């Protein structure tokens, strides 16, 4: 069953509240506050979809309640309809100026009130849907769809900000590049579906072994890159070795009950925040170290200054 929209009624006159509750409770979940302070306290702990707000209330009037709601980023998307006996243009103008979405004068017409409530709820639902779509598109543009790691485009963009922070704070910053050993043999022998499962499994290992501040990226095919803030070359070598061992110990269970084991080779380089013109220099050094690991038997970690 679809959840009914919830409405917070804020009015210090209980008779007005009773009328609204009787009118709206068949269609909406109703929450009541008899003063502005109580309304703000309710909004801290309870989600509502719309607020019906009186203006003339003691201590905190409706204007001030609306101002505070609109200043709070956690609840400022809740539409507010003022319901008041004040009919002068100055009061109406002020209601919109503080963030009100609509204005209904007392005594109100029930059909008109229903129509205005329905409109504001529809607008809010549309905005939420658009925001959700926007976030989904942003995620798609920044993320590798197979592994849920960031993609190369986002890595190139985000790494610039991370490098600037390292320069400003004079902190160490390192790059780890890793590549699945003999991945073509895996694809040719077991098929691309198994190859994809290996890539996904490696991505999950990386996600489980990195910090929130680290940037983990699928750089292309079976190649991955990590950017590690506040991490020296020695520290990155330790992390790379832990990753190497973790992958070496991992087994992918195949459909015929066999197990498939793979290894990775890793190259490590520290970014020279004073002299490197960009991250590309450090990536190139890490890539050279990676291929040195390959040439020396694979399943190894090498570094290049």
Image: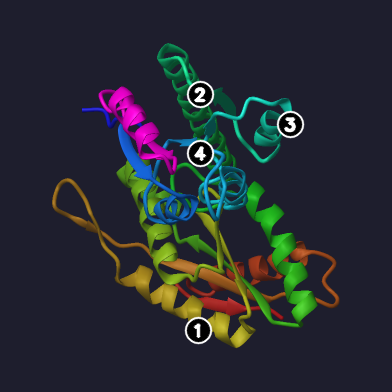
Q: Nearer the viewer, mark 4 or mark 1?
A: 4
Q: Nearer the viewer, mark 1 or mark 2?
A: 2
Residue bounds of the magenta highlight? 7-28
Residue 302, image x, y percentages: 58, 78
Q: Are marks 4 and 3 in contact (CB under 8 Å)?
A: no
The residue at the point 67 percent across, 69 percent down is 288
Return the residue at label 1: 238
Across and down, in percent, residue 217 comes to 55, 56
- N-terminal-most mark, 2 or 4: 4
From the viewer's perspective, tell me whether residue 145 is left or right of residue 92. left
Q: State the residue position of label 4.
A: 78
**Label 3, label 2: how many angstroms apart (C-alpha)?**
16 Å
In contact (CB < 8 Å): disc 1 and disc 2: no
Residue extending farthest bottom: 234
Question: First in sequence: mark 3 or mark 1?
Answer: 3
Is 291 or 54 nearer to us in this picture?
Answer: 54
Give the secondary structure at mark 1.
helix
**Residue at which label 2 appears:** 106
The one nearer the camera, 262 or 104, is: 104
Separation of marks 2 and 4 at Cα, in angstroms: 22 Å
Give the colour scheme of this rendering. rainbow
Q: Residue 90 carries which label?
A: 3
């Amino acid at each position: 069953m679809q959840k009914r929209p919830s409405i917070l009624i804020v009015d210090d006159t209980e008779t007005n509240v009773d009328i609204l509750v009787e009118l709206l409770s068949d269609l909406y979940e109703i929450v009541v506050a008899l003063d502005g302070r109580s309304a703000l306290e309710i909004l801290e702990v309870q989600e509502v979809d719309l607020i019906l707000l009186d203006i003339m209330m003691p201590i905190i009037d409706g204007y001030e309640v609306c101002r505070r709601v609109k200043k709070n980023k956690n609840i400022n998307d809740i539409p507010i309809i003022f319901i008041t006996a004040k009919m002068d243009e100055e009061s109406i103008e002020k209601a919109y100026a503080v963030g009100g979405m609509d204005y209904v004068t007392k005594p109100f017409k029930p059909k008109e009130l229903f129509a205005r409530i329905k409109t504001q709820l529809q607008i809010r639902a549309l905005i939420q849907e658009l925001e959700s779509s926007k976030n989904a598109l942003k995620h798609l543009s920044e993320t590798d769809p197979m592994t849920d790691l960031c993609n190369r485009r986002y890595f190139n963009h985000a790494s610039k900000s991370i490098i600037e922070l390292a320069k400003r704070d004079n902190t160490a910053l390192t790059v780890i590049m890793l590549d699945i050993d003999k991945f073509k043999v895996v694809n040719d022998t077991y098929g691309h579906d198994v190859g994809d499962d290996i890539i996904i499994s490696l991505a999950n290992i990386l996600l489980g072994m990195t910090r929130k501040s680290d940037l983990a990226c699928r750089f292309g095919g079976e190649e991955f890159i990590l950017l590690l803030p506040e991490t020296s070359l020695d520290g990155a070598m330790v992390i790379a070795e832990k990753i190497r061992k973790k992958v070496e110990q991992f087994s992918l269970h195949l459909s015929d009950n066999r197990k498939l084991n793979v290894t990775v080779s890793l190259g490590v380089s520290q970014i020279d925040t004073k002299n490197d013109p960009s991250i590309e220099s450090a990536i190139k050094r890490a890539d050279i170290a990676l291929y040195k690991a390959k040439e020396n038997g694979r399943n190894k970690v090498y570094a290049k200054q």
